[in-house]
Amino acid sequence: MLFRTLLVHANADPHLQARLALAVSVAREHGAKLMIVHPFQPLLTSMFYGEHVPVQAIEAQIELERRNAAEIKDRTAEYLSREGVAWEWRTQEGPLEPVLASSGVIADMIIMGQDEHDRDSSLVATVALTAGRPVLCVPHTGTFTTCGRRVLVAWNGSRESARATHDALPFLQKADNVILFAADPEAERGASVPDAAAHLAAHGAKVEVKRTVLGDLDAGSAILNAAAETGADLVVMGAYGHTRLSEWVFGGATRSILQAMTVPVLLSH
């Protein structure tokens, strides 16, 4: 299995080039094309909806957003022109989450950055929960020119962890080592750890099992600790959450991982 199309979220984030560098590395490894998507929603239309705002002011704001997008595109093109990978640019008007989720339908994976200003990590989590595609989130600190050589898979037998493991197969099949990480056996649901390990081995993954007892430790902290202890350069885990009226409520492990991640994390729901 290979990733063939990678959607990269482009914005004014100063860490965009680091995100692109990792995307380029994955694209080379898999012979994939990059689809760079820049969503934008003019501030005036979102802040003053329903109020009497001069049309000229709204048009000026839209034009400003388009110029900003063009500048980001130019910087991206300058960088990617030296990297020798296929890519295309798309500027799409609309709210971030729906644009990324709808665009992701024609991609194999969505690559986003950890937002240091988003305390709840709600953008990445919402896209992971709604896109129907795995989301690779890149930390805002550190440089990651590769990932997927040593992969930690968080396993609890749930549908979400099974989905994430399946979506990560293109990484797992190429990895030097896959650590199947599980907590107390009584915390498992569905397929057992030995069954999951056998399934991955049947796909050609080099698997080892690592267990832990959570005790007073929360699942997110246990996963982060295991990633550090094993030298993992990629964490794979299910994204957990549900809707409460019109808002997403995220699982504790999803939130804590996205807030404190130190290596790229692949999330899938």
Image (cartoon, grey):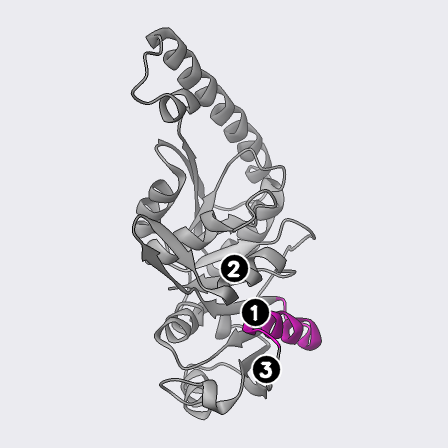
Give the structural element (helix, strand or loop) at label 2: helix
Towards the viewer: 30 or 57: 57
Callout 2 touching callout 1 (CB < 8 Å): yes
| Amino acid type, mark 2 | Arg
Towards the viewer: 58 or 152: 58
Horizontal and vertical percent position of residue 175 = 55, 73
Give the structural element (helix, strand or loop) at label 3: loop
Towards the viewer: 218 or 260: 218
Horizontal and vertical percent position of residue 262 = 65, 60
Give how far apart the Cα atoms at labels 3 and 1 are: 10 Å
Give how far apart the Cα atoms at labels 2 and 1 are: 8 Å
| Amino acid type, mark 3 | Leu
Residue 255: numbered disc: 2
Looking at marks 2 and 1 on the same chain, the residue that comes earlier in the sequence is marked by: 1
Where the C terminus falls, by quadrant?
Answer: bottom left
Could you tell me which residue is drawn at 37 percent across and 12 percent down? 59
Residue receiving disc 1: 220
Residue 214: numbered disc: 3
Towards the viewer: 95 or 133: 95
Q: Is residue 256 visible?
A: yes
Q: Is residue 94 left or right of residue 61?
A: left
Residue 242 in which image quadrant: bottom left
| Amino acid type, mark 1 | Gly
Callout 3 touching callout 2 (CB < 8 Å): no
How crowded is the residue under tag 3: few (<14 C-alpha within 10 Å), some, or many (20+)? some
244 above or below 171?
above
100 above or below 89?
below
